[in-house]
Amino acid sequence: MLLVYTHKISPRLKYIFKHICVRVLGIEVSFTTKIEEFIAHDSLKMSYTKQPLSKEFFIKSHDILFEQGLSDIEINMQAWGDTKCFFYLGEKSSMPFDIFSASFYLLSRYEEYLPHVKDEFGRFTATESLAYKEGFLHQPVVDIWAYKFKEALQKQFPEFEFPKRTYQIKPIIDVPSAYNYKLKGIIRTLGGTIKDIVRFRLKSLYIRFAVLLGFRHDPFDTFKYLINRQKTSPFKFLFFFLIGDYSTYDKGINPNKKKFVSLIKYVGDYCRVGIKISYFALEDEKLLKKEKQRMDDILNTHVRASRQSFSKLNLPETYRNLIALEIQEDYTMGYVNHIGFRAGSSTSFLFYDLDYEVQTPLKIVPYHLMDFTLLKQKSLLDKKKVLSKVINEIKQVDGEFVPVFHNYTFNDARKWRGFKELFNLILESPNEV
């Protein structure tokens, strides 16, 4: 166990130390404000305050962990080996940066509470982030810093054996619409047909009626392929089905259709299933509750995991609404148009509510790549290179890779050619040395 001496045990301090020590490094941590207790401790220990007591392992504390609310924080980014960090401390400290304060800034999403420019969907974008502006979005810096902390502690306490964690993957399958043509109803089918005719999309018109007449497989129906892949993988896939009502933004299948309900149950027999919350339910508690109840009824159990439509988050309201409905995990923390680490981490973390200054029970599982971002790469070889870079970054810190694919990604359309191979590359990545 690591004992931390500090002048004040604040909620922020307990939150971030427990994340880095327990969730990333796998060691227990406790805190004291009593010098006698600190001196008597005969295992891992460090002081985290303004001045060292003696020659102990010491990190000079930044004020952010002892404040409440938001303040205007000056951030000066500096190079640190192969990565970057901020909150520089100088030579007195056992580490050159206050990694705890820097990690708290990123994990709490402090910057998303501050004024920023949003995109057309009201989302916080990668280009607004500190990580993008300072060029470290591609690295899980919180995990890298934690490993540097572990290395420094190991030098001071060479006899202590740190537990080891292993690289993991958690494939996400996002299902905004289970089918492209099937189960759409007469009005939507008629509307789609007219659009195909007006826009001279003769191939689409042909496929539409071939599917509806039962001569052809619906291109979005890739579920048998995915379940066959699940059967050969030790890592559980997590499917998010949209069951919200039809709207401007969400054009899924009517959740009252028996065949759609049967599909969700079928997938749930082999994989984990969560709820993809509709765009309008994001800010409407009654609608959100209605959608969750629908999914609870379909699965015949309480749904544990959620993803927000269009990867939209409004902090802290979105997460508070999920907590109120007893959803335990959310998978929205990531960027649709950029590969990388929105919260600087490849390790899941608990949501810290900056307004209430409290650690909540909601587990945030950040995703690091969405299939759309790989479309920017022209060749399959380029896509593989980009994917391998992300995987290698996460492997270096024994983190968990969370990629988001869609059910339609695995169809035979030219746009998605080679994506089955990329998915297989991810599934096989834990076996590669």
Image: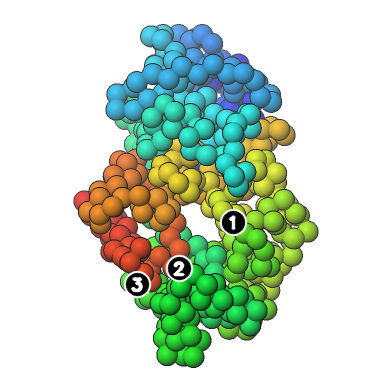
**What number of labels is visible?**
3
Question: Which label lies toward us, 3 or 1?
Answer: 3
Q: Is residue 228 above or below residue 175?
A: below
Q: Is residue 68 visible?
A: yes
Q: Residue at x 71, y 33 (%)?
A: 355
Question: Which label lies toward us, 3 or 2?
Answer: 3
| Closer-to-camera residue (11/36) | 11
Q: Residues within 10 Å of mark 3 (few under 14, many from 20)?
A: some
Three-letter residue code for mark 2: Asn
Q: Position of residue 422 (x, y in %)?
A: 30, 60
Q: Is residue 2 visible?
A: no
Earlier residue among tags 3 and 2: 2
Q: CA distance from mark 3 to mark 2?
A: 12 Å
Q: CA distance from mark 3 to mark 1?
A: 25 Å
Q: Is residue 322 above or below residue 119?
A: below
Q: Residue at x 50, y 62 (%)?
A: 174
Secondary structure beneath dot 1 equals helix
Judging by the rendered image, the residue that carries numbered circle 1 is 309
| Closer-to-camera residue (218/112) | 218
Q: Position of residue 170 (x, y in %)?
A: 42, 57
Judging by the rendered image, the residue that carries numbered circle 2 is 407
| Closer-to-camera residue (30/428) | 428
In this rendering, would 248 be left or right of 268? right
Judging by the rendered image, the residue that carries numbered circle 3 is 412
Q: Residue at x 38, y 9 (%)?
A: 91
